[in-house]
Amino acid sequence: MKLLTTRFGTVEVPDKDVLFFSLGVLGFPEVRRYVMLDHGRNTPLKWLQAVDKPELAFPMVPATDLVEDYHITVSPDDLAALAMESTDELLAFVILTILAFVILTIPNAAPEGTTANLKAPIVMNPTTHLARQVLVEQDYPIRYPLAVAQPATVECAG
């Protein structure tokens, strides 16, 4: 599908890459179809671009790129909406494909003041393309300053 966006111009994305949010994203309940677009090479930054609203795009990064021990518990209702049976199943997806993303807020005049919303990550099921912004039970901040981020490390057994 050809997707017209305000930020990126016209981009081509496969229909299979469209994510469906049954409740929309917080603050935008009527917008339910999104795609993830890469910001560029050598950066974890991605954009959650609305399919039906060209001007709506959220910058986001994998949560584990910011917080080394970021762990979340997802409610049974949210798991059902994602067509997952357990948090363990979600965790397996997250470990394999990094599917917990956090939305960034980047101030116009002061990008060094960028914060991440760790309290309401975006989680997705890569099999069904269902996605949801969830409110987690853990005591994570809504405005986590990137200046204090401690990225997770990935170790490979050799």
Image: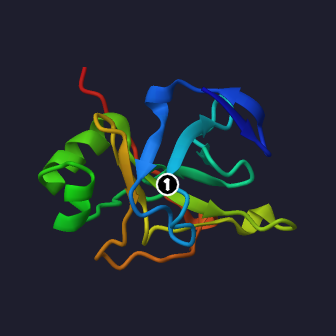
10 Å neighbourhood of mark 1: few (<14), some, or many (≥20)? Answer: many
In this rendered view, identify the residue nearer to me: 14 or 90: 14
In this rendered view, identify the residue nearer to me: 47 or 65: 47
Q: Quadrant of residue 110?
A: bottom right
Residue occupying the far right of the picture? 109
Residue 99 spot, x, y in % from top left: 38, 45
In the image, is 17 to the left or to the right of 56? left
- The quadrant in which the N terminus is found is top right
Residue located beneath label 1 in the image: 32
| Amino acid marked by disc 1 | Arg
Name the residue rendered at 24%, 26% in the picture. Answer: 157
In the image, is 150 to the left or to the right of 98? right
Name the residue rendered at 51%, 67% in the picture. Answer: 29
Residue 5 spot, x, y in % from top left: 74, 41
In this rendered view, identify the residue nearer to me: 14 or 136: 14
Residue 12 spot, x, y in % from top left: 65, 24
